[in-house]
Image (cartoon, coloured by chain):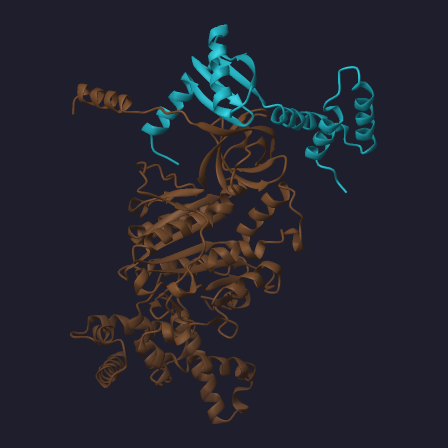
């Protein structure tokens, strides 16, 4: 029977839930051994992604990536953090700021697989679509 | 129009533009290659939803799995990089449709490819659609005149029917379809010719012929050429059908030619195998029957409550070595309302169109013929079948009784009359006249080799007459006494002059 990445991630969560930092050493090594036995070590990236989602859900947190053309000030990051916390009804927001000059200006906020594109390049793209014909 | 006016217009459009950003669902490309991309994320994507890659290419989400989405790329997949963002558009795959598409050559996504001006869409029609239900339909009762004597007389096609054209390569399948399209001039029909995986040179030649015959005034050509990705060949027939449905919903009659569905099945097989769907018989995926049945079921005749429009489908299938019992041919034969079976043997013997009347059938039959034709061609099929049986004895010419010899002679003349040149569709009135002459023995005294010439002069003669036979048949559409009288008179007059 094939065990899906979601199930592995759930198992990992159950293993470490409620334990302290000293206690998780052995259970984690058992987990890795189990993975190796099932020859599923290659899936570790996806399992960690799913684990991160489960953790956030259980602890009312979201991971948020903010892409901007220049480094954002703390005040701005605070505002974004509050905005996301309200929109997704969570307590903690882990904000990561990535710099990408190609977007021109403004910000792109990505939470999981939802993206809010208020960058200059995004708005120009929408404007172009509006003004031209096509699918 | 001066420069400042244009600038003002542009400025007002830009100002009026409300750039409200909404959250969009996105994903990331994990793998890309061979026309398919594997994407993670895209959690709420619908099946067959349009997705957009960052590089501008469009794709269709086909495989929805737990961890990833298999996206079929509708364009150049070499531009897409791993790690790229993919946005879902919220729209199911649809194409722009418009009256302006008549006379144009377009690709399966609705973009023009004939180099003339762009078309702005009036509406968007979904490429995949559920076929009209039972209660919205009406039985087929109007004819589609192909202009080909062998077909209109013995295997008649009606508006709303699906008639398969099946045969080996180079037997004249496309020629029949093109002659049918050319003959729709003045018949109140729109035509859509869908070229699936065909050579670009062949398509160019076809478009040129259609333009020469004036058929582009009511025809649209949808092209997914041999060098286009398989994804475009896959949706080409559905796009053509969507365009036809746009006209049908307005109450018009449409003829759609799918040339050809064998390549369509190959393209689908390619996409399915790359998406790792399990292969079945002949490596086709398990739902290859559904691939064609859902396409052909959308051809229908609607009743008056729904506009009374119709879509007639002429799918084409290429067989290998005459094998009609292979997988795809048998599938499509069981879906369509009849087939026109073309044989290479007949083709090389000089019988063109190479229709095997015995194996060809039209399940709609007489209800799709004008009364005149029904009466005149009623016995034609039987006579031809009997002739084929007796043909072997034709070698023993002297040893046969009078009746058999007469039958053989009549049969030979029938075969001669049914031969027809390419791009020479004949109006149904002329067909009725010549078949009447044939079945009533007026050609029995003409030598077989001279029949063709006789026929050509006969039609010229009928055209030159005063209040002539052709017009009477066109008006009355049935063999009333008046019509029969006019026909007999015309034929006798011609025979006298011809001597």
Q: Is residue B374 left or right of residue B10?
A: right
Q: Is residue B388 left or right of residue B436?
A: right
Relative to B435, say whether B329 is above or below: above
Along the line of sight, the residue nearer the viewer: A37 or B80? A37
Along the line of sight, the residue nearer the viewer: B315 or B352? B315
Tell me which chain appears cyan: A
Q: Colour of chain B?
A: brown
Relative to B221, say whether B167 is above or below: below
Q: Quadrant of residue A1?
A: top right
Q: Quadrant of residue A29?
A: top right
Please give the name of the residue rendered at 45% of the width and 79% of the height, measured from the top-left corner.
Answer: B381
Please give the name of the residue rendered at 27% of the width and 79% of the height, measured from the top-left corner.
Answer: B478
Along the line of sight, the residue nearer the viewer: A104 or B416? A104
Q: Residue furthest bottom?
A: B401
Q: Quarter holding the N terminus of chain B? A: top left
Relative to B422, say whether B26 is above or below: above
Q: Quadrant of residue B305?
A: bottom left
Can residue B52 be seen in the rendering of this structure? yes
């Amino acid at each position: 029977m094939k065990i899906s990445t979601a199930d592995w991630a759930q198992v990992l969560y159950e293993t470490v839930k409620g334990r302290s930092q000293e206690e998780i050493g052995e259970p984690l090594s058992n987990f890795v051994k189990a993975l190796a036995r099932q020859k599923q070590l290659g899936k570790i990236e996806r399992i960690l992604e799913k684990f991160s989602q489960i953790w956030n859900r259980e602890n009312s947190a979201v991971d948020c990536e903010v892409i901007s053309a220049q480094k954002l000030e703390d005040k701005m990051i605070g505002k974004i953090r509050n905005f996301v916390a309200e929109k997704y009804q969570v307590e903690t927001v882990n904000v990561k700021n990535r710099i990408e000059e190609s977007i021109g200006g403004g910000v792109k906020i990505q939470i999981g697989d939802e993206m809010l594109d208020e960058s200059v390049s995004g708005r120009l793209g929408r404007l172009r679509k509006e003004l031209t014909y096509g699918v | 129009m001066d420069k400042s006016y244009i600038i003002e217009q542009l400025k007002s459009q830009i100002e009026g533009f409300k750039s409200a950003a909404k959250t969009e669902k996105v994903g990331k490309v994990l793998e890309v290659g061979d026309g398919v991309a594997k994407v993670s994320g895209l959690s709420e994507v619908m099946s067959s939803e349009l997705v957009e890659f960052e590089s501008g290419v469009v794709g269709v989400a086909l495989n929805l799995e737990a961890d990833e989405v298999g996206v079929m790329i509708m364009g150049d997949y070499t531009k897409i990089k791993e790690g790229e963002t993919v946005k879902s558009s919220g729209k199911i795959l649809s194409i722009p449709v418009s009256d302006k598409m008549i006379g144009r050559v377009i690709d399966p996504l609705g973009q023009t490819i004939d180099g003339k001006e762009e078309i702005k869409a009036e509406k968007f029609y979904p490429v995949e659609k559920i076929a009209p239900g039972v209660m919205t339909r009406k039985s087929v009762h109007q004819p589609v005149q192909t202009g080909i004597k062998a077909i209109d007389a013995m295997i008649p096609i009606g508006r709303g029917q699906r008639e398969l054209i099946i045969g080996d390569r180079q037997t004249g399948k496309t020629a029949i379809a093109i002659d049918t399209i050319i003959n729709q001039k003045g018949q109140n029909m729109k035509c859509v010719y869908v070229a699936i995986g065909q050579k670009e040179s062949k398509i160019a030649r076809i478009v040129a012929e259609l333009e020469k015959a004036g058929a582009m005034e009511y025809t649209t050509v949808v092209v997914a050429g041999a060098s286009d990705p398989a994804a475009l060949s896959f949706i080409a027939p559905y796009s053509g059908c969507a365009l036809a449905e746009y006209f049908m919903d307005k109450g018009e009659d449409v003829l759609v030619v799918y040339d050809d569905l064998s390549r369509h099945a190959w393209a689908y097989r390619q996409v399915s195998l790359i998406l790792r769907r399990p292969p079945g018989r002949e490596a086709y995926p398990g739902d290859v029957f559904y691939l064609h049945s859902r396409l052909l079921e959308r051809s229908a005749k609607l009743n008056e409550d729904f506009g009374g429009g119709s879509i007639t489908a002429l799918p084409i299938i290429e067989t290998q070595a005459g094998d009609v019992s292979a997988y795809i041919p048998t599938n499509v034969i069981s879906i369509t309302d009849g087939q026109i079976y073309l044989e290479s043997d007949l083709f090389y013997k000089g019988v063109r169109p190479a229709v095997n009347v015995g194996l060809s059938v039209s399940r709609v039959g007489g209800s799709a013929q004008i009364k005149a034709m029904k009466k005149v061609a009623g016995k034609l099929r039987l006579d031809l079948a009997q002739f084929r049986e007796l043909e072997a004895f034709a070698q023993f010419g002297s040893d046969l009784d009078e009746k058999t010899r007469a039958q053989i002679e009549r049969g030979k003349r029938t075969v001669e009359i049914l031969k027809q040149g390419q791009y020479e569709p004949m109006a149904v009135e002329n067909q009725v006249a010549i078949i009447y002459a044939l079945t009533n023995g007026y050609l029995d005294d003409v030598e077989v080799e001279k029949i063709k010439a006789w026929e050509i002069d006969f039609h010229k003669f009928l055209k030159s007459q005063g209040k002539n036979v052709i017009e009477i048949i066109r008006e009355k559409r049935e063999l009333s006494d008046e019509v029969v009288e006019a026909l007999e008179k015309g034929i006798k007059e011609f025979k006298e002059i011809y001597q």
